[in-house]
Amino acid sequence: MERNFIKEHGSSRPVWPKCLLLLFFMVLLLFVNLYAGSVPVPLKEVLRILCSDAEGSMAADIVLKIRFPRALSALFLGGALALSGYLLQTFFHNPIAGPFVLGISSGAKLCVAIVMIASARFLFPLHSLTLIIAAFCGALIAMGFVLLLSARVNRMSLLIVAGIMIGYICSAVTDFAVTFAEDAQIVNLHNWTRGSFSGMNWENVRTIVLSTVSCLAGILLLAKPISAYQMGEEYAQSLGVNVRRLRVLLILLSSLLAAVVSAFAGPVSFVGIAVPHLVKRLLKTARPLVLIPACFLGGGIFCLGCDVLARCLFAPTELSISTVTAVFGAPVVLVVMLRRQKERL
C-alpha cells in the first residue's frame, strides 16, 4: 500500500518552480487578452490605463469595461471548469469524466435557458444568483441521472456514453425551448448556448470570483480526504474518512462549479477533462494539495489562451469558445483513451 501511495502521488521533487511557471503564463495571457483584439491597444497604453485608472478615452473604455472583465471571467470560469473535471475524475476514478462529457453542463444549460426565456416572457427580473441556482438545479438533475446509471452499469465506458446521451437530450430540449423565445432573444440565446465569455461586466465578475473562490477554498479543505480516497474507499475508511459524506461533497462542489460556468458563459467543452491531465503531466504528481490550485491556474490559462484566439483569429468575426477549446482539448482526451487502452493490453 505504501509503494502504491508513493507511486500515485509522485516523487518528492519540488513542484513550486512549475507552479510559478503556471502563474507567469497566467499573468502573461491576462495582459495579452487586454491589448489584443479587433481594436488593438498598445501594451504601454494598457499599463497606463491600469496604473492611472484613466477613463473617458475609447482605449480606456475598451480595456476597463470590455476586455478586463471578460479576461477575469475567462480566468476564473476556466479554473472552475478544470476543478469540476478534477473532482469528477476523482469521484468516478475515471480520467475522461468531466462536466461536459457527463452531460452536467448540458443539464445546467437547459435550466438556465428555460429561466431566461421565462424571464423575458413573464417580465420578471433576472439576477446572477437566479441563473446560478437554475444552473445548479439542472446540473444536479443531470448528475442524478448519471449516478442512477452508474449503479446499473458496471463498465465505465458505458457510463460515459450514457452521459453523452444525457447531454444530447438536454441540448435537444434546450434547442426546442429556444424556439419559443422572443425574436430579440434568439440571437443572444443562440450565442450563449454555443459558449462565450463576451458581455461580461464587473457585477458578473464579482459574483463569479466569489462563487469560484468559495468553492476553491472548500476543495482545498478536502485535500487530505481526497488524497486518501484516491487510494481506494477501504483505505480511506481505514484512515477515518467519511466516504459517503466526501462523495456527496464532491458531487455538490463539482456541480456548483459547472453551474457557475454554464450560468455566465454557457457550455464550454473539454476544459474539465483536458486540463487536469495536462497539469498532472507537467507537475509529475497527483497530490491533491498541489493539483487543486494548479488545476485552477491551468484552467484559467487554457481558457484565456482559447478566448484570445476566439476573438482574434478571424476578427472581427468571433468564434464560440467551445469551438476553440474542443480543437485543443479533444486531442488530449484521445491520447488519454489510447494510453488507457495500452495499459489494459
Image (cartoon, rainbow, N blue to C red):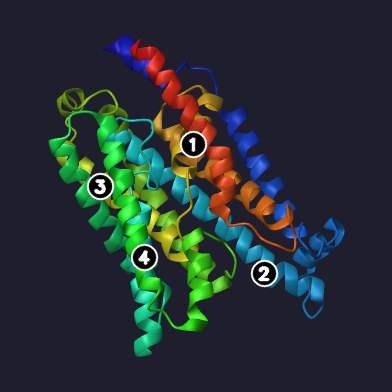
**Pointer 4: residues within 10 angstroms few (<14), some, or many (20+)?**
many
Of callouts 3 and 4, which one flags the residue occurring earlier in the amino acid sequence? 4
Of callouts 1 and 3, which one flags the residue occurring earlier in the amino acid sequence? 3
Q: Quadrant of the N terminus?
A: top left
- Residue drawn at 20 percent across, 50 percent down: 145
Of callouts 1 and 2, which one flags the residue occurring earlier in the amino acid sequence? 2
* Residue 46 horizontal/vertical position (percent): 80, 62
Q: Quadrant of residue 151?
A: top left
Q: Give residue 66's mark.
A: 2
Would you say 249 lies left or right of 197 here?
A: left
Q: Quadrant of the C terminus?
A: top left
Mark 1 or mark 2: which is in front?
1
Would you say 310 lies left or right of 117 here?
A: right
What is the distance, in whole Å, between disc 1 and disc 4 at their CAs?
A: 26 Å
**Pointer 3: residues within 10 angstroms few (<14), some, or many (20+)?**
some
Q: Give residue 249's mark.
A: 3
Q: Is residue 84 visible?
A: yes
Mark 1 or mark 4: which is in front?
4
Query: Which of 103 and 232 lies nearest the eye of the viewer?
Result: 103
Q: Give residue 286's mark.
A: none
Of callouts 2 and 4, which one flags the residue occurring earlier in the amino acid sequence? 2
What is the distance, in whole Å, between disc 3 and disc 4 at their CAs?
A: 28 Å
What is the distance, in whole Å, between disc 3 and disc 2 at their CAs?
A: 35 Å
- Residue drawn at 68 percent across, 53 percent down: 308
Q: Please name the residue that numbered disc 4 is placed on.
A: 174
Q: Please name the residue that numbered disc 1 is placed on.
A: 274
Query: Which of 213 and 79 lies nearest the eye of the viewer?
Result: 79
Q: Quadrant of residue 14?
A: top right
* Residue 194 horizontal/vertical position (percent): 50, 59
Of callouts 1 and 4, which one flags the residue occurring earlier in the amino acid sequence? 4
Classify mark 2: helix, strand or loop. Answer: helix
What is the distance, in whole Å, between disc 1 and disc 2 at their CAs?
A: 28 Å
